[in-house]
Image: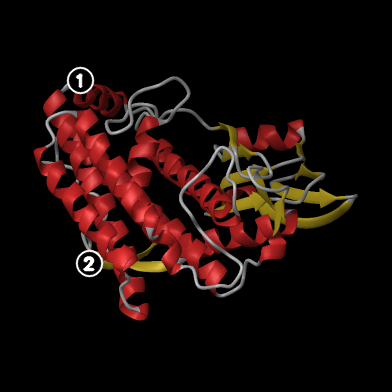
């Protein structure tokens, strides 16, 4: 089963029997059998015909709509699964302060560990700078405070502090001339690195939400991220452990290997949003998708799985915890 991204602007997606076809100016540029399709991601100015939409809904294909720059607009899914017991147990867990606190603490601990692994890999190759040393020490301190956190707000404070320390030296991993990173900014991103990170995190969130829907959990009920209208809090929770190992790794490699270059971005000037050019969006989406298909050793099962499968297995592990067949949720930790 495949995830397909349509990034051609002014494209039209049509149904031709059991095939979804992408046409640009009357010429077919791509096609895929709906039986091989698990998710369709439509980016920007793309027309989806009623017949194509009807087929996608009929076959239960998760259809996601993003702006061309990667901002999430919405999705059409086949609806929640029939596992009412799973969702009721999920709501009960959220209402249990001790369980919610322990789960949020575990998620943040894994996120901090994975961010440290990311930084340590680069520091071993290039040598550790004083700034990296301070950031790594600060992240360890945040992890230590996390063990003592007595409320969800304290857990969130530890996560925020560790993430700020991480991004203070994230730019040290970027070697390509012409690129710099002075800190995380978004909505809108103000430099090329942040533009790539924002798009990458959106694509990762789509992958996590697809897995959450497949398993049957409620994507809007989480622990670390407070429940808010129109925010899939559980997706935000389960995305955290994969940010550094999936998206950040791709962004740094794409820049350092010059797959993404300065000319791939539109910069209107200081303080103005930076946008990824049309053709570069397709290239970066391909890099993220290649990462999601690449294999990694999944320690809980002792097998090699694609990152996309690892994400689904982690969502299933969370469901087992919610149902009480696992003592706690153990997030993914990089080695």
The residue under label 2 is: 302
Identify which residue is drawn at 66% across, 37% down. 55
Identify which residue is drawn at 38% across, 60% down. 169
Identify which residue is drawn at 63% across, 43% down. 271
Q: Quadrant of residue 151?
A: top left
Q: Nearer the viewer, mark 2 or mark 1?
A: 1
Is residue 83 at all visible to an observer of this figure? yes
Mark number, residue 282: none
Instruction: Give percent across and percent down for residue 70.
Output: 61, 44
Dot placed on the residue nearer the N-terminal end, 2 or 1:
1
Q: Is residue 188 left or right of residue 110?
A: right
Instruction: Give percent across and percent down for residue 204.
Output: 47, 49
Q: Is 221 drawn above or below residue 69 in the view shown?
A: above
Q: Is 254 drawn above or below residue 158 in the view shown?
A: below
Q: Is residue 196 left or right of residue 51?
A: left
Is residue 304 at all visible to an observer of this figure? no
Q: Is 104 drawn above or below residue 142 in the view shown?
A: above
Mark number, residue 95: 1
């Amino acid at each position: 089963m495949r995830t397909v991204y349509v990034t051609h602007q002014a494209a039209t997606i049509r149904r031709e029997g059991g095939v979804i076809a992408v046409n640009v100016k009357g010429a077919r540029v791509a096609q895929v059998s709906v039986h091989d399709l698990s998710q369709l991601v439509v980016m920007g100015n793309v027309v989806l015909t009623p017949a194509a939409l009807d087929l996608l809904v009929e076959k239960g294909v998760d259809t996601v709509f993003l702006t061309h720059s990667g901002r999430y607009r919405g999705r059409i899914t086949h609806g929640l699964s029939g596992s009412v017991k799973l969702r009721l147990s999920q709501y009960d867990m959220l209402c249990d302060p001790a369980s919610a606190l322990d789960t949020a603490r575990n998620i943040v601990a894994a996120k901090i560990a994975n961010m440290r692994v990311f930084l340590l890999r680069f520091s071993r190759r290039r040598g550790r700078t004083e700034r990296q040393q301070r950031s790594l020490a600060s992240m360890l301190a945040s992890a230590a405070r996390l063990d003592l956190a007595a409320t969800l707000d304290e857990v969130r404070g530890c996560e925020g502090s560790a993430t700020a320390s991480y991004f203070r030296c994230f730019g040290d991993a970027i070697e390509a001339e012409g690129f710099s990173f002075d800190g995380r900014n978004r909505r809108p991103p103000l430099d090329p690195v942040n533009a790539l990170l924002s798009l990458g995190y959106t694509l990762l969130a789509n992958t996590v939400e697809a897995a959450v829907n497949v398993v049957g959990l409620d994507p809007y009920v989480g622990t670390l991220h407070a429940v808010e209208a129109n925010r899939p809090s559980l997706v935000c929770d389960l995305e955290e452990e994969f940010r550094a190992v999936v998206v950040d790794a791709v962004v740094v490699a794409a820049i350092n290997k010059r797959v993404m270059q300065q000319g791939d971005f539109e910069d209107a000037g200081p303080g103005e949003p930076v946008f990824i050019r049309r053709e570069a969006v397709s290239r970066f989406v391909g890099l993220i998708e290649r990462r999601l298909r690449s294999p990694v050793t999944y320690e809980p099962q002792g097998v090699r799985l694609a990152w996309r499968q690892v994400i689904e297995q982690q969502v299933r592990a969370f469901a087992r915890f919610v149902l009480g067949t696992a003592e706690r949720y153990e997030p993914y930790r990089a080695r």
